[in-house]
Amino acid sequence: MPITPRDIREQLLASNPEFQQLAQEHSRYEAQIEQLSRAEFVNVENLTQEAELKKKRLRVKDQMEQFIARTWRGSAAS
């Protein structure tokens, strides 16, 4: 059975401290964005903060995807 990116992600979450840290950081940004989106009143400061958090979350997600791609290429070469 071929290894999928999801399998690699689970493997990295279980064994790679750097990937685990990235996943925790991504979750933290996600929670902060969710909290801001539940605010009763929207102001410029909240919108700016939400935009920055989304950029950070995306940057972390890109790093995680790079990890997965490198691991996948490494497993395919084996």
Image (cartoon, helix red, strand yellow):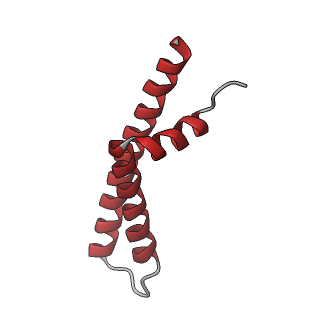
Instruction: Return the residue nearer the eye: 60 or 76.
Output: 76
Asked which quadrant contains residue 33, the reply is bottom left
Instruction: Return the residue nearer the eye: 47 or 77.
Output: 77
Left or right of residue 12, residue 25 in this image? left
Residue at x-position 35% and y-position 66%? 50
Asked which quadrant contains residue 15, the reply is top left
Instruction: Return the residue nearer the eye: 62 or 6.
Output: 6
Left or right of residue 14, residue 6 in this image? right
Question: How many numbered marks does the figure carry?
Answer: 0
Residue at x-position 29% and y-position 66%? 48
- Name, please, the residue furthest toward the left: 45
- Name, please, the residue furthest toward the bottom: 40
Asked which quadrant contains residue 42, the reply is bottom left
Q: Position of residue 6 (x, y in %)?
A: 59, 39
Q: Quadrant of the N terminus?
A: top right
Q: Position of residue 36 (x, y in %)?
A: 39, 75
- Name, please, the residue furthest toward the right: 1
Against 38, residue 61 (above or below) is above
Q: Position of residue 39 (x, y in %)?
A: 42, 83
Residue at x-position 45% and y-position 36%? 65
Against 78, residue 72 (above or below) is below
